[in-house]
Amino acid sequence: MGNSYKCKDFTLLISGPYHPNIIKQIEYNEVFKNVVISNWEGDPVLNVGHKQVFTKKPNYSTCQEIHNSQNIYLHCLCVLSGLQHVKTKYVIKLRTDELYTTIRNALDWFREDRILTCNVFTRNVSYAPFHISDHIMISDLEVLKKTFQYLRDYLENNSESDEFNLLRDTVPAESKIGFAYMKVKERELSRIDTLDVEYAYRLMLEEMDIFEVDKLVPIEIKSSAAGVFSCYERFVAIDTKLQLRYHRNISDLKPLTKMDIFSYRVKSKLNRIIRRVFLSNGANLIKKFSQPKK
């Protein structure tokens, strides 16, 4: 799939705490000449020939007062600090602790009027509305900036009213970002927990796109819940903890039918059984071969 977008029209924004993958990310994707690194105060200064900005991290008491489930508030602050220094029309937001060696391939799926994310940890609309991925986000600069500004302001100023019910730990951080994006796109929204799933799905089809992250291999994806892995499709196939599905495009995030739910539960149960048998047999083999020879 080809398009007319050029790497010179995009800035790589690598945002988060310092990680050695920052330098690798820049080296592998040297075709991008515009790079901004957004770290926290106290992180090391990198001599990589690109803009590096440092944000003062709020103290613990501040993060207790402001909703920060899944570090969403800190995420907003760090991303926004970096976005202020982006000069190109478009931006590609990345995490500091991950590695994608062929990011330019993702531009094949980019459309100017939509936000494009990878499919890492995306969820169908029945699970949560607007649950795109925040591992790779590609967007018009001003739209992404307004999205994170909206969410930051909401987090700071709505601790009591919470008009859209976003300040609950049960609302995933990705859905909060997706909701803020839809508000910036001037879509009519009610509380996130009462949104009609068919309506939310239609909005996602009109305003969002996703692509398969495995198209960027070699890759290194990190999750606090799952560790580090190098193939997302394989990871989803063996996952028994996060109950993920593999989504190839935005239409795959459609509402689940009763049959979908039933078949997925069966698959998850089978995977758990297979994994338990495998681990059990593996432990027995280790025990057997670790016995001293008589």
Image: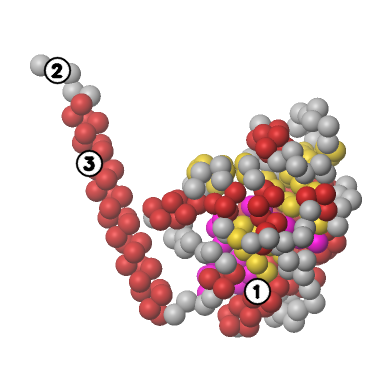
In space, the residues marked 3 and 1 are separated at their CA atoms by 44 Å
**Badge 3: how crowded within 10 Å, few (<14), some, or many (20+)?**
few
Q: Secondary structure at mark 3?
A: helix
Q: Amino acid at mark 3?
A: Asn
Mark 2 and mark 1 lie on one chain; the one further toward the N terminus is 1
Q: Amino acid at mark 2?
A: Lys
Q: Nearer the viewer, mark 2 or mark 1?
A: 1
Question: What residue is shown with label 1?
Answer: 204
| Residue 239 in view here | no
In the image, what residue occupies the spot 68% across and 60% down? Answer: 2
**Badge 2: how crowded within 10 Å, few (<14), some, or many (20+)?**
few
Question: What residue is shown with label 2?
Answer: 293
Please give the range of residues in magenta: 120-140
In space, the residues marked 3 and 2 are separated at their CA atoms by 20 Å
Question: What residue is shown with label 3?
Answer: 281
Q: Is residue 200 positioned above or below 75 on the image?
A: below
Image coordinates of residue 41 in percent, x first then y, are 80, 35
Q: Is residue 131 positioned above or below 281 on the image?
A: below
In the image, what residue occupies the spot 64% across and 75% down? Answer: 205
Q: Secondary structure at mark 1?
A: helix
> Where the C terminus falls, by quadrant?
top left
